[in-house]
Image (tube, helix red, strand yellow):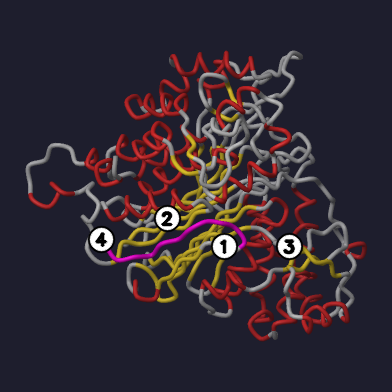
Amino acid sequence: MTAGALLLAACGLVEFGEEETRGTIGYVEGFIGGVAADEPRAALVGRDILSAGGNAADAAVAMYFTLAVTMPSAASLGGGGVCLVHDAETEETLMLDFVARAPQDIPPSASRPSAVPGNPRGFFALYARYGLLRWESLIAPASNLARFGTPVSRALAQDIYAASSALADDPAIMAVFMDSGTGKLVREGSILKQPDLSAILGQMVSKGPGDFYSGQTARLLVESAKRAGGSLGIEDLRSFKPVWLEPLRYPFGNNTVFFPQPPAAAGGVAGAMWHLLKSEDLFVEADDAGRAHLLLESGMRAFADRSRWMLDNGDTRWSAAEILDTRRFEVDMEALASTSKHVSPDTLPQKPVARPENPSGTSFVAVDRDGGAVACSISLNNLFGTGRVAPGTGIVLATVPGHRGSGPISQIPALVLNANVNQLFWAGAASGGVAAPTALMNVLSHSMLVEGTIQDAMNIRRVHHGGLPDVSYVERGLAPAIVSSLRAAGHTVQEAPAIGRVNAFMCFGGLPQAPETCDVAHDPRGFGLSFMAEGL
C-alpha cells in the first residue's frame, strides 16, 4: 500500500471546497516545512504528513509511530520521552513529559524490571491538543510497515549489531529480529515483519491508546511483561498520564531559547552552557580554537552546576524557577572572560559528580510551514531497553529508570522563538547520553550565536567536557592546530569517534515570515534523513 493511499484515510466527509483534499499527499503547494530524524523512513513519513496538510504535531505523531516500527531499539512503544512543542495558531510553547517511569511495585520475581510505557499516551496527548488530521491516518503508515515489512535501515542495523550478544539470549526477541532465511539477526536491507506489533498498532488505530492502557491490550502487555521478567502492573498502565509543563526559558535578545526542565536534566545543563556562552559576546568574538575552549569550559561548569540540584536517582531538589536563576553563574562568567586557560574542576566552588548515563536514545524534529514546531527526544532507558520483548506484542520493554544510569536525564530538545511576533528560528534535539546536551550546544552555538548555516554547524567537529573525569573529548578529525591550542591551554585532550547525534531545523529570517531562509539537517554521525521541501 502506498503512502498516498494510507493518507487518504485522513480525508473524512466534508461539504466545502479545499478541505476535500486535506490528508492527501500534495495538498500543500509551495513550502511545507521540514523534518529530520535518526531513521530515514520516519523522516519520509513526516514529510508526507506535512505535504498532506498536517501540522508539526501531526508529523511528529506519525514520525514517532513509524520509529516504533523502524527503530524499536530506541523508540519502542515500551519507552518514553520529552518533547518541546510550539503551536503557531495558539502561540503556545510547552514541554510534554511522558518519560517511561518506574512501576509502583517491582516484585522479587522480576529478573529484568521494566518501566511503564509513556510513548503511546504521550503522543496521543500531543495529537489531542494540537493535531489536525485524523488520528488513524497518522498511525496507519506504521501499522502497515509492521504488517507488510520494511527493509532494515542502517540506523537499526547498527543498534542490532551493538546489542547482538544480548539479543541472542532471548527467544522472543529473536523471533522478532531473526532473518528466517539465515536464522541470524536481521541485517541492513533485510525485510523486517512484525505481525504482533502490527496488531497492537491496529488496535491503536481504531481505539486510540485507551485499550493499550486499560483494556485487553493492557492485560496482554502486563502478562507478557511478567513472562519476560518485567514488572508492569495493570494499575501502572491505567494511572500513567503525560504532563504538560512550562519549559526552561532563557533570553536571547528579542528571542527566547527553550529547553526542557527535569526530569530531562540535560535541559538545565544546556541552559547553563547557553547562558555562559552568550555572555559578553565571548563565543562570537573567539576564533575556532577559542570557541572549542569555551564549549569545553562551559560544559564542565554546567555539569558541576547540575550536581547542585540533581539527586543521585535523577530527580531534582530545585524548582524550575531556581534552575533558571542565573545569578549563581556570575563567578563562572568572570572566570571565562578573564582567562583562556583551562580550570581544573577540583577548583570550582561546586565540584561535578561523575554519574553513568544511558547513552541510547533517538531524536526527531518536525516544523510546519506556519512556524509550528515539535522537537522530541525518546528512549527505552537503555539500548533495546531490558533486552526483552513482551511475547505476543512485539513490544521491546524499557528498563526501569535510575538503574546504572538509565533514565531520561540526557533527553534534550530545544527551540528558539521570538514570542512577541510568533516567529520560529531554531528547533532541534539530541541524543548520546552525557554528551547529548553538549552535542546540541555545539550545533546551537555555531548556528545561532555566530549565525552559521545549520549544515555547517552540524558538520563542525564537536568537543565535550562532562565535569569528571577532567578530560576534554574532541571528535576525531578536529584540526591539529585547535588540538594543540587546547593542550597549550591546559586541557587533557582525548579523541572520540563521535560526540552525540543532533537533528535540527533553522530559519535565520524566522518562520513563517521568511521560509526562503530555512534549512534542516540530520547528523552525518548517524544514518538518518532530513527534508525541507516544496509541496509535491
- The correct choice, above or below, for 143 with respect to 45 in the image is above
Q: Which residue is mark 2?
A: 366
Where residue 398 appears, as percent x and y from the top left, is: 63, 32
Q: Quadrant of residue 205?
A: top left
Viewer-nearest residue: 260 or 116:
116
**Three-letter amino acid code at disc 1?**
Asp
**Three-letter amino acid code at disc 2?**
Ala
Local crowd size for mark 4, using a 10 Å CA cut-off: few (<14), some (14–19), many (≥20) = some
SS under mark 4: loop
Do callouts 2 and 1 mark residues in contact (Cβ within 8 Å)?
no
**Three-letter amino acid code at disc 3?**
Pro
Task: Pick whichever of labels 4 and 2 is earlier in the sequence.
Answer: 2
Per the model, the C-alpha gap separating discs 1 and 3 is 14 Å
Quick check: 68 left or right of 344? left
Marking on residue 523: 1
Q: Which residue is mark 3?
A: 497
Q: Quadrant of residue 485?
A: bottom right
Location of the N terminus by quadrant is top left
SS under mark 2: strand
Q: Nearer the viewer, mark 2 or mark 3?
A: 3
Q: Which residues are magenta?
A: 525-536
Quick check: 274 left or right of 349? left
Q: Which residue is mark 4?
A: 536
